[in-house]
Amino acid sequence: MTDSKYFTTTKKGEIFELKAELNSDKKEKKKEAVKKVIASMTVGKDVSALFPDVVNCMQTDNLELKKLVYLYLMNYAKSQPDMAIMAVNTFVKDCEDPNPLIRALAVRTMGCIRVDKITEYLCEPLRKCLKDEDPYVRKTAAVCVAKLHDINAQLVEDQGFLDTLKDLISDSNPMVVANAVAALSEIAESHPNSNLLDLNPQSINKLLTALNECTEWGQIFILDCLANYTPRDDRESQSICERVTPRLSHANSAVVLSAVKVLMKFMEMLPKDLDYYGTLLKKLAPPLVTLLSAEPELQYVALRNINLIVQKRPEILKHEMKVFFVKYNDPIYVKLEKLDIMIRLASQANIAQVLAELKEYATEVDVDFVRKAVRAIGRCAIKVEQSAERCVSTLLDLIQTKVNYVVQEAIVVIKDIFRKYPNKYESVIATLCENLDSLDEPEARAAMIWIVGEYAERIDNADELLESFLEGFHDESTQVQLQLLTAIVKLFLKKPTETQELVQQVLSLATQDSDNPDLRDRGYIYWRLLSTDPVAAKEVVLAEKPLISEETDLIEPTLLEELICHIGTLASVYHKPPSAFVEGSRGVQHKRLPARAGSGESAESPDTVSTGGVSEAPPAVIPSQGDLLGDLLNLDLTPPTTTGPPPPTSSMQMGAMDLLGGGLDSLLGGDIGGSPAMGASFGAPPAVMPGSFNAPVSGGLSDLFDLGGGVGMPMGAYVPPKTVWLPAMKAKGLEISGTFARRSGVVQMEMTLTNKAMSVMGDFAIQFNRNSFGLAPAGPLQVLTPFTPNQSIEVTLPLNTVGPVMKMEPLNNLQVAVKNNIDVFYFSCQYPISMLFVEDGKMERQVFLATWKDIPNDNESQFQIKDCHLNSDAASNKLQGSNIFTIAKRTVDGQDMLYQSMKLTNGIWILAELKVQAGNPNYTISLKCRAPEVAQSVFQSYEAVLKN
Amino acid sequence: MIHSLFLVNASGDIFLEKHWKSVVSRSVCDYFFEAQERATEPENVPPVIPTPHHYLISVLRHRIYFVAVIQSEVPPLFVIEFLHRVVDTFQDYFGVCTEAAIKDNVVVVYELLEEMLDNGFPLATESNILKELIKPPTILRTMVNTITGSTNVGEQLPTGQLSVVPWRRTGVKYTNNEAYFDVVEEIDAIIDKSGSTITAEIQGVIDACVKLTGMPDLTLSFMNPRLLDDVSFHPCVRFKRWEAERILSFIPPDGNFRLLSYHVSSQNLVAIPVYVKHNITFREGSSQGRFDLTLGPKQTMGKAVESVLVSSQLPRGVLNTNLNPSQGTYTFDPVTKLLTWDVGKINPQKLPSLKGSMSLQAGASKPDENPTINIQFKIQQMAISGLKVNRLDMYGEKYKPFKGIKYMTKAGKFQVRT
């Protein structure tokens, strides 16, 4: 006799029959009937018509029957609110029952009946139950408050239930405490700003005591609640950690992960040299490893969280690489996550092992997994420099397998390897070219074309190869088309004689026959560049590209920190901030997993960065093309009727700016005379654009235009006022005052020489002592002679940085010797380090992030800049003038954070984070650099630039 | 917290739904079905699926998907752990957890689910407490209930529910007092082509069956507790005592429970009890392949390796096999390409082998992938990590219990690459 019999009655008069049975006098029959009703309900049949009959069965001493009726009530009360009132009396009566089980059951069920009318009757019994002598009833009542709050929040507040609930945190019974915490947490979620869970050291102590004694689920609630607390000092933080650590040995993985969260968060507060800190780090590893031996679903969640943990504190799991090795029967979602973590943990120490594994994976069956494994090999090469060679040879082995998708993935990653280690592994190009025909995926084709274009001079038949791609130009995806266009232009610049026809063909394909604005715009720009100034074109297109960073897929540090605070939650599974969930659960579409971080790195076309500096070279126009182009551009750009500024959505303009950045002015400047129409349409925008971007254009656009918009408002580099370097007293009448400046990318020493002696001077020469950045005169010191007494002349001496290097103290000290016909004089001066900031000191965002992380924290130094009254945008502009580039700006709580980068002439990158608080004249600046010695001088430059 | 639960069978039908808050339309499962369709294998359905208004968290056990619906930020592990607990409870109650069993006991299932969660908050998940609240169905009880009209729902507040030892009920009485412990270790290992160990780790558990009268307080000590540096305890174990003295001290739950699970990590040396000699080759151009497999014991401390079962997923190109086992039986499923060889016991004097040829699709090229060999085995009376229980003492009660300890080693995910 089983319950399945309840499912079998499918006759037509079923409801009618049930009705009769429900009204039967026999208890047993009644119960059977209710069971049948419940069974129908569970499979989704509508049995709401039986409501009155079922409710009639409620008045019974039989607990099972009562429970069944309650089950029914909870399901259907909403659709029959009037009938539900009939049940109220029984509930109220049951709340007085001597049996605590029945009291609890009644208050629990009432809370589940989501009918407004009933909630009014619920208040009194609930109040009593919250103070019931039996803890079982109290803990049930605590949850009931949360239920009631969900139905009618105002009522709960008016009735003062929240305060009662808060009191329950100090209850003597741990289960009651746990449930009170759970209920409060749930209520607090809908009131983000309420202080429902304001914890103080006393309540923390209560929670920690309850933590040891309540059920596993209660422990989760309490731990999650603890994680929101901020300890007053490291002492308190340590004592909480000590009391939470035993939870790491709990059998319930959710408890373990919640404990990990609390520890990861509070650990931040502990001083690193503390012994306990080290102990704690060691204790964290085993429970995380253990999570990986659980069921696959648990493993998945654990892996997503471990992914965050290894980014934050790689030291915890650095010896545990092996547990992340993939078993062939792991579910695919576990495999992919493990792979990701393997790469994050890869280091010189274990790279051989990792590579051997990855190669093994690359021969598995599952296509997605194999692809990711191949990509992982590429990422290893980029991450661990020493392994690059081995990675490349592994990839070549894989290409030899001729498995189509393996070959394609391998080519995509080899492209990245080329970008990281240029001019190192070009010998493999021949092998790659052999597989040209088998490539059918856009990404692989694009990568291959990029390689051919980039190394066109070493590939004999590069033109043939590219021409073969050109045949089906219009059937290719945009990615491939763009790449093909760029590659052919590169080829043309490298071998102009043989490929003129080809380049014209591709330019016309791109500009005339394509509907894709990106492609067309890029085509125009190349065309124009080539026609106006091939030398400039060469410098733009063949510019040295910045190396790609080792970890482009790292989570942004601030987001990572936020996510670490949410370990174990959905946010940590999706690696998205919880703000995307709390309200976002309504309305925002989360249809699929966020794009895996790894895919971003190669999606970005290599050419967007190839637009470094445009220098002004003498124009050498190819006339025929130029004319044609001028016409085309006029057509495209000048809206036939307008006189006002063209709409900022004009794709041409955006493309242009994106591609050319700062070079735009010079490029267009030369042309304005030639085509007045163009001049007009372009002349206007810069004045207007900055205003129009700032407000409405969000996200993508501001990315395109960068902050501060280098177009409209160039600010000159800061030049310190001249100071006297060599007083006349000391130099037999020769007085030299001077300063340093950087003008159009050239470092200059600008001096005023005054002859205070009685005789004419001549035969000037200058020499520098060895100095920190190898500064040396780029030419002789030219002083107009005769240099008569009381005459003053201005001398500008261009400098280069190829001289001998010796570290000076202070760093920016320069010792100079000046000779004239009288004697040799020595003086020393200090130059602002900002004049050594080069024009291409703007880092890619991704690179910036990775580098910032990569530089050890010890290299970070912080300074205060006092009494500066600029707002962040003005500051950013001003700094940009001195080649301090703002890469990103974030506003947090009214505080603007500018992320800036600069590069010294000797290639040292300096990263900075400038915090500007509106209304506060004191800025805080953090500098990070691999050579921390420069920090002090850089800071001085900041101060000088900002204050002048 | 947890909003609703849907049970979905292998063919994609929802056969049970339960809502703890307002009713969520079962159409929400469409997103799950979409994901299910995309996944090539049933176990590849991602465990967390977002939908516009809800999140679906699912586990697959006994070929049933348990799909929980949540609406707000809830720790996914919490949900997954709870779902596993539901499955365990069903198994505990009905012996098996199948669609048929659940349908047969649908009312009990409903009562259980209602007891386990209140408004999405876990209420009673300890099997001891549940069994006091809702009696497990037995044939005898069903008959008695039918005759007397009594119920299978407990009338009393479960005693363990609020005590400091919620896992144990009071007033337990047995005529034979006994306490048995099983130390079971599983080796997870990956062995590479050449026979060297890539990774090996041991997952161990100590399961207990304790039937003791009253409130006994037990202590269990080990010969070599140093091995246990990564452990998860049943809540009954006093953690402080373990930290200080490396002794397990606890008041046990009544009946079967898992006292602790532990993990001996790959950094320790793990003994590998079997070795495999294999030679699986396909020749380019011919439609034949060679298959040659020999098993042998190693590092077994003289204990016999039993219940050996070898399975391997052969490449898709393999049409059929013609193999000859020296012992046991083998099967090859030409559809799934799964080769299984039930070896039985390994005799060290005469090593079991499986030799022969495989026929490939004519004209097909040599398969790219190398099949992985999966091995299952059991070794009685040995814990491969070397863990040994020293002694078991009982305090708090006067009688003398029967005590027993068994050891066993099994293969977990034991894979040999070829």
Image (cartoon, grey):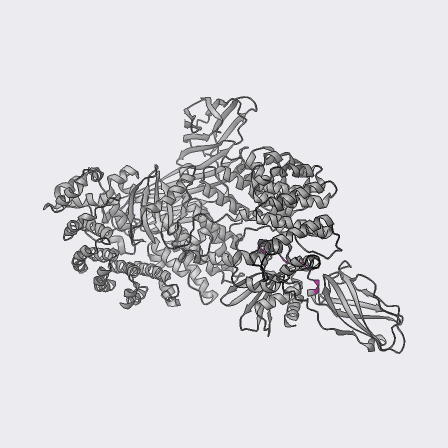
Q: Please state if B323 lies on the left or on the right of B156 as rendered.
A: right
Asked which quadrant contains residue A693, the reply is bottom right
Q: Is residue A522 above or below residue B8?
A: below
Magenta-highlighted residues: A835-845
Q: Quadrant of the C terminus of chain A?
A: bottom right
Q: Please state if A754 lies on the left or on the right of A443 as rendered.
A: right
Asked which quadrant contains residue A8, the reply is top left
Q: Is residue A305 above or below residue B386?
A: below
Res. A611 visible in picture: yes
Res. A388 visible in picture: no
Q: Quadrant of the N terminus of chain A?
A: top left
Q: Nearer the viewer, residue A856 or B6?
A: B6
Magenta region includes residue A616: no
Magenta region includes residue A840: yes
Q: Please state if A137 lies on the left or on the right of A239 as rendered.
A: left
Q: Nearer the viewer, residue B183 or A223?
A: A223
Q: Nearer the viewer, residue A35 or A855?
A: A35
Q: Is residue A763 above or below residue A907?
A: below
Q: How many marks?
A: 0
Query: Where in the figure is residue A712, as x and y percent of width and height?
Result: 63, 63
The furthest residue to the front: A641
Magenta segment, principal secondary structure? loop
Query: Where in the figure is residue B306, as x and y percent of width and height?
Result: 40, 31
Residue at left offset 63%, top offset 61%:
A711
Residue at left offset 47%, top offset 67%:
A233
Query: Where in the figure is residue A789, as x and y percent of width and height?
Result: 87, 77
Q: Nearer the viewer, residue B415 or B300?
A: B415
Query: Where in the figure is residue A630, as x and y percent of width and height?
Result: 67, 52
